[in-house]
Amino acid sequence: MSNIGNFKRVGREVVYKGKILEFCQDEIQTSKGHHVTWDFLNHKGAAAIVPVMDDGKILMVKQWRNVVNRVSLEIPAGAKDTVEEPTLECATRELEEETGYKPGRMEFLHTIVPAVAYSGEIIDIYVAFDLQKSHQNFDEDEDIELVVALPFVGHDAKWDQRSKRRMEFILQHCSKKEVIGNEDCRESYVKRNCYMVDQANYLVAVYDDVRNLRSGTMQCVRYARKNDVPVVLIHPDTANITYPMESIKSAGCDLTNNNISWKKR
């Protein structure tokens, strides 16, 4: 007869407590009476959402993930605020925070334990229907204001419909809109680019500094460097991040564990 189920946890020591995870060392009594130490990650639990659009397509999000050091395409998901929080509340909140949509109806789909060997994270998955446009809600420590700087009115007249819809969505949810130029000309674009850099303590740009393609982003990067504004570059293909260490520190940037977070001046 197998004794595979005759294991018992007899002790737990919390070695490190983070914002989301606790790293623990558990004392385990085996089926033969031996005592061994196993690593364990304690987690509050989480919810994930499969958002179904009216046309049947699945709404997904792109996020840069430190574990794989690249951008990942995912369904919206997030940790519970507390152990006691119902996962349905968590799912509804995370869907709006990450996508800007509220669900008209949510149905429970499945529960998974993604890392059953060493983690206590349990994820309840829901399917969201009848999505309604809302707005993204940032966490308290993010404090992000979206300001759109336009070169002139009607700058998007020759854009394709998909790009126009994206701009329309951004304008609906931005905090403020600034129109910099008065006419359709190169000077209006240059003024817009300089205006954005002039408002900044630092510049974050998705840009390939090696290929150096002629673009508005290139103008912003060059203007920032000319005026000693620190520049953080995110590579458009690999999502690798490069930055001038000393100037970034002087601008009030915390680079702990390679996570870029900015402190207000």
Image (cartoon, rainbow, N blue to C red):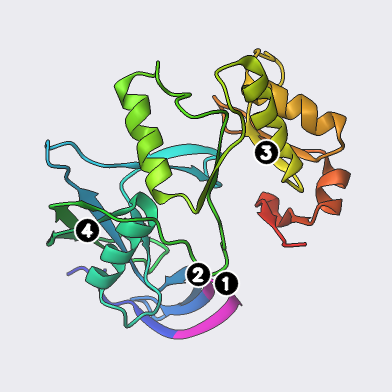
Kindly identify which residue carries mark 3: 196
How far separated are the C-alphas under marks 4 and 3? Answer: 40 Å
Kindly identify which residue carries mark 2: 21
262 shown above or below 170: below
Point out the stretch of residues depicted in magenta.
Answer: 11-24
- Tell me the amino acid under the disc marked 3: Met
> Relative to 86, is 145 on the left or the right?
right
> Of the numbered discs in the image, which one, if any, rests on residue 80?
none
How far separated are the C-alphas under marks 2 and 3? Answer: 38 Å
CA neighbours of label 3 inside 10 A, class few (<14), some (14 to 19), many (20+): some
- Tell me the amino acid under the disc marked 1: Gly
Question: Which comes before the other along the chain, label 2 or label 3?
Answer: 2
Does the residue at mark 2 contact the one at mark 3 (Cβ under 8 Å)?
Answer: no
> Relative to 130, is 254 on the left or the right?
right
How far separated are the C-alphas under marks 2 and 4? Answer: 20 Å
Indicate the quadrant where residue 181 lies. Answer: top right
Kindly identify which residue carries mark 4: 125
> Relative to 18, is 154 on the left or the right?
left
How far separated are the C-alphas under marks 3 and 1? Answer: 36 Å
Who's the residue at 33% across and 51% down the image?
Answer: 76
> Of the numbered discs in the image, which one, if any, rests on residue 18?
1
Does the residue at mark 1 contact the one at mark 2 (Cβ under 8 Å)?
Answer: yes
Q: Main secondary structure of the magenta part?
A: strand
